[in-house]
Amino acid sequence: MIIKEYGADKKDTILLLHGGGLSWWNYREVAELLQGEYHVIIPILDGHAGSDRAFTTIEDNAEELISFVDEELSGSVLLIGGLSLGGQILLEVLSRRQNICDHALVESAAVIPSKLTNMMIAPTFGSCYSLIGNRGFSRLQFKSLHIKSDLFEDYYRDTCQIKKQDMIAFLKANTAYSLKDTFRKSSADIHVYVGEREVKEILRSAESICRMNPSSKLHRMKGLRHGEFSINHADEYANAIRQIVKS
């Protein structure tokens, strides 16, 4: 596992799992804001730019993360946060190890499978993958994600490095993921964040997560779209982490 690390001299560790198709820079600004208070680790998810292995499954990524925490961090951390695909991996980790973290921040994670979307991924991305290296096409894709403009070069560089089979694999995993029943047993203080302007499937997923683990707390963010919280509002995201930990 390849990681980016901030505040390594601090005692309490926070893990942040970036979104699918992005990379560690998803949380770079958040990490810079928190490095004076916490040890912040941002793993690069399998199959993404800078990673050391191909993407297989969300479950495999979860096991890899659990092994990393066991081997390098004494089996538990203060908080784990995750966006979208990273949020799904976080949910899978919580389902497999109930006491791996004290707190969890799940942002915009889908847990309601979409069979139609899943079926369309391979033919759709198979036909347009060659366009990814085109800056004009990439800029249109970037604009559709509503990510702040100063991250375009990071996005373009790293998207161009994702292999076709990896992109198809993690997109298919993302649209097929469902919560495991063992998620109910997680002892973590779980906070679920979702933007009010997200698609219905993500809004419904947030509610489903909280129903399965009733102690979870749902936070609806006014005016925000998918992923905007951690990427575009790093100061507010960092403050949310501080408040969660202190509470």
Image (tube, rainbow, N blue to C red):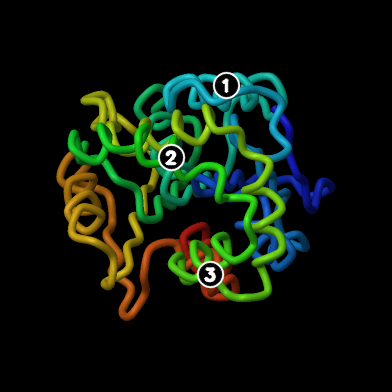
Check contact, mark 1 vs mark 2: CB within 8 A.
Answer: no
Residue at disc 3, secondary structure: loop
Label 3 amino acid? Ile
Report the front residue among 75 and 108: 108
Q: Which residue is mark 1?
A: 64
Residue 109 position within the rendered picture, expressed as x and y whole percent measured from the top left: 34, 48
Q: Which residue is mark 2?
A: 127
Tell me the residue that label 3 is attached to: 147
Q: Nearer the viewer, residue 169 or 125?
A: 125
Q: CA distance from mark 3 to mark 1?
A: 28 Å
- The percent position of residue 60, horizontal first and vertical second, equals 49, 19
Looking at the image, residue 231 sits to the left or right of residue 212; the answer is right
Question: Of label 3 and label 2, which has the lower sequence position?
Answer: 2
Nearer the N terminus, badge 1 or badge 2? 1
Residue type at numbered disc 1: Glu
Judged from the image, the secondary structure of the residue bearing numbered disc 2 is helix
